[in-house]
Image (cartoon, rainbow, N blue to C red):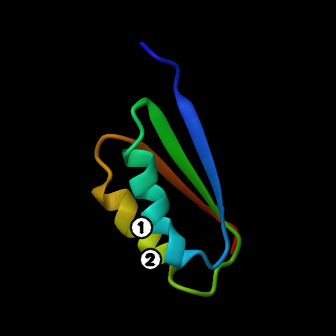
Amino acid sequence: MHSLVSVVTPVYNSAAFLRRTFISLLDQTYTNWEWILVDDCSSDNSIDIINQIIQRSEEHTSELQSHS
């Protein structure tokens, strides 16, 4: 078993980049990873997009930490 890799992404009004970031993670050949997103009071729809991604992510662990 390969070691778990944690990818930590700080988020602040990053709605335009979140889906592309997730697709980039999915395109990796290494598959044992988790994505941890840390939101810092975004005022755009970043949280909505993150929640959509989490709901659709079945194979990988995703966690949202919101500092609001």
Q: Residues within 10 Å of mark 2 (few under 14, many from 20)?
A: few
Q: Relative to 6, is 25 above or below?
A: below
Q: Are marks 1 and 2 in contact (CB under 8 Å)?
A: yes
Asked if residue 61 lies left or right of residue 10, the reply is left
Please, what secondary structure does the residue beneath circle 1 have?
Answer: helix
Asked if residue 44 lies left or right of residue 10, the reply is left
Distance (Cα) linking label 1 and label 2: 5 Å
Image quadrant holding the N terminus, namely top left
Image quadrant holding the C terminus, namely bottom right
Asked if residue 10 lies left or right of residue 46, the reply is right
Mark identifier at residue 48: 2
Instruction: Name the amino acid type tagged 2.
Output: Asp
Q: Residue furthest bottom?
A: 43
Q: Relative to 37, is 46 above or below?
A: below
Q: Nearer the viewer, residue 48 or 30?
A: 30
**Residue 21 in the image, given as x and y percentages of width and height:** 49, 59
Residue beneath disc 1: 51
Q: Residues within 10 Å of mark 1 (few under 14, many from 20)?
A: some
The residue sitting at 44% across, 64% down in the picture is 20
Please, what secondary structure does the residue beneath circle 2 have?
Answer: helix
**Residue 7 in the image, given as x and y percentages of width and height:** 59, 43
Instruction: Name the amino acid type tagged 1.
Output: Asn
**Residue 44 in the image, given as x and y percentages of width and height:** 57, 86
